[in-house]
Image (spheres, helix red, strand yellow):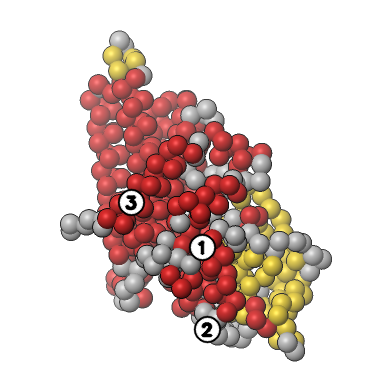
Amino acid sequence: MDFKLNDEQELLRNGLTKFLATRYGLETSRGAAKTGPGWQPEIWRAFAEELGILGAALPEEHGGIGGGPVEMMLIAEALGHALVVEPYVDTAVVAAGLLERAGGDVAADLLEQIASGSAIVTLAATEARSGDNWRDVGTVAERDGEHWVLNGAKIVSASTPMAQRVIVTARTSGERADTAGISLFLVEVSSQTTELTLHHYRTIDDRRASDLELDNVRVAASALLGSEGDAWSSLARARDEGAAAVCAEAVGAMRKVLSDTVEYCKQRQQFGAPIGSFQVLQHRMVDMYMEVEQAAAAALLAVLKLDADEATRARAVSAAKATVGRAAQFVGQQAVQLHGGMGMTEELAIGHYFKRLTALQFEFGSTDQHVTRYAQLTTA
């Protein structure tokens, strides 16, 4: 397939790549991630005001530029290459997609705020018992006059420590594992109350996440996003969009890891010669290159199929997530081994990229889960 970017997409990619190369230093970002608030708010504002990437895939009526999945892929890959910790995928892809499909004045207002960089919205869909199965929802919401009352708990809600609002999945009818009966509610998280408790923490890849405990949390009727009990189809699409986005992010990270590894092998001397001149190590780097290119092709196919019918979309996304997961593991491990003990130190970028590539294998479904789903979809 001959896939070429149009002029606008080339400008988007080149402008973002240049911005990150000159203004997003790894040392500064790791410092903010480890000892500061977990991110750089000024960078987030620049993403919106100078680059316009937060609304690149959003419709123009919501303050976006009317792009689509390809623009999302270009942005995610560039962010992965620079190891950006700011919550682009969680907010501008997953949460924004849910809001756009929900419709209504509240959602429209929030989409404009996301595009302008003035609001961060995340999703809380995972629970301790169900793990990464978004359909298995134990959190419940009951109607009380003009309000809804939410009770339950969520775990590992990515980027929520940075957010002002979180979209919470809750069951309003049906049995626990049913697809019908799941609803989405917008909950304020900017200030903790006795009803809503948040436990923030840093993850292994220097991101931030939260566990939420909801004890009779009351929200207005307008906090219900979309139709009551009819959120599953939108959630399933959001999960696939998130998976496709992190596949693109992983491709960007792997390209950087491969480039750094090749350069290191040109410089590292052993037995009076660069280790990159040893044929056995050249073979390893070729294998790394092949894995990266296969992952890039699979990620591209998944992105191009996001607007297809549900079964086609799901097959392409699961194939990509499985392919990228295998590649991320192989490329990350080979890079660390070729760097020797230095590969796992804080001083080298490789160690940080390795952690992110490891975490990416489990976001929006693990490699094994997507292998299983792909098998089920192709044999049904």
Q: CA distance from mark 1 to mark 2?
A: 26 Å
Q: Residue at x 31, y 45 (%)?
A: 292
Tell me whether circle 1 and circle 2 mark residues in contact (CB < 8 Å).
no
State the separation of the CA atoms marked 3 and 1.
Answer: 19 Å
Q: In percent of the image, x 66 and y 74: which residue is there?
A: 139
Q: Position of residue 165 (x, y in %)?
A: 64, 65
- Element class at badge 1: helix
Work out which quarter of the rendered image holds the C terminus and state it.
bottom left
Residue 329 visible to an observer of this rendering: no
Question: Which residue type does callout 1 highlight?
Answer: Ala
Residue 234 percent across, percent down from the top left: 47, 76
Residue 115: give its label: 1
Question: Are dots 3 and 2 in contact, CB under 8 Å?
Answer: no
Which residue is under mark 3? 11
Q: Which mark is residue 230?
A: 2
Spatial CA distance of label 3 from label 2 is 39 Å
User: In front: mark 1 or mark 2?
Assistant: 1
Discs 3/2, front: 3
Name above or below for residue 331 compared with residue 314. Answer: above
Q: How many marks?
A: 3
Element type where label 3 sits in the image: helix
- Which mark sits nearer the N-terminus, 1 or 2? 1
| Pick the front one: 184 or 53 | 53
As helix, strand or loop, the secondary structure at mark 2 comes to loop
User: Hey, what amino acid is under mark 3?
Assistant: Leu
- Residue 129 percent across, percent down from the top left: 62, 66
- Name the residue at the right extreme: 194
